[in-house]
Amino acid sequence: MPTTIQIEESLRDKLNEMKLHPRETYNDVLERLFEDLLELSQETRKDIKKAVKEIESGKYKTHEEVKEEMGFK
């Protein structure tokens, strides 16, 4: 069921800029934003867990090691 919310004009302007086409609704814009945030959060959490496991198992290189491998000393 549609409802009315109050937002500042500056936020409305930003939402308008984010529309993929002029007739896209604010609801569609907000849904797209929330989907992107949730996907990013889940993907980021998985990446962090993977990185922590790699670090704990010793699978990492220091900055110094990488610089040396790249020929920077």
Image: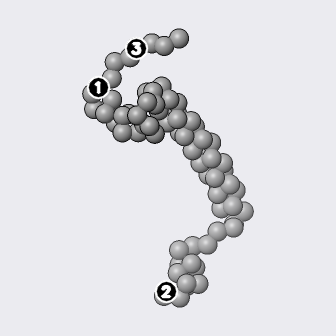
The residue wearing badge 2 is 72
Measured as percent of width and height from the top left, residue 56 is found at: 68, 59
Label 2 vs label 3, nearer the camera: 3
Residue 56 placement, left or right of 62: right
Measured as percent of width and height from the top left, residue 35 is found at: 56, 36
Q: What is the residue that sits farthest to the right in this orientation?
A: 57
Measured as percent of width and height from the top left, residue 22 is found at: 40, 34
Helix, strand or loop at disc 2? loop
Q: Alpha-carbon distance for marks 2 and 1? A: 51 Å
Q: Alpha-carbon distance for marks 2 and 3? A: 59 Å
* Residue at the image point whose x is 40% and y is 14% from the top: 4
Q: What amino acid type is highlighted by mark number 3? A: Thr
Residue 3 placement, left or right of 13: right
Q: What amino acid type is highlighted by mark number 1? A: Glu
The residue wearing badge 1 is 8
Mark 3, Cα crowd under 10 Å, few <14 / some 14-19 / many 20+, is few
Mark 1, Cα crowd under 10 Å, few <14 / some 14-19 / many 20+, is few
Label whose residue precedes the other's in the sequence (2 or 1): 1
* Residue at the image point whose x is 69% and y is 66% from the top: 58
Nearer to us in this view, 22 or 9: 22
Asked whether the residues under the numbered discs 1 and 3 touch, taking CB atoms below 8 Å apart as contact, a structural biologist would say no
Helix, strand or loop at disc 3? loop
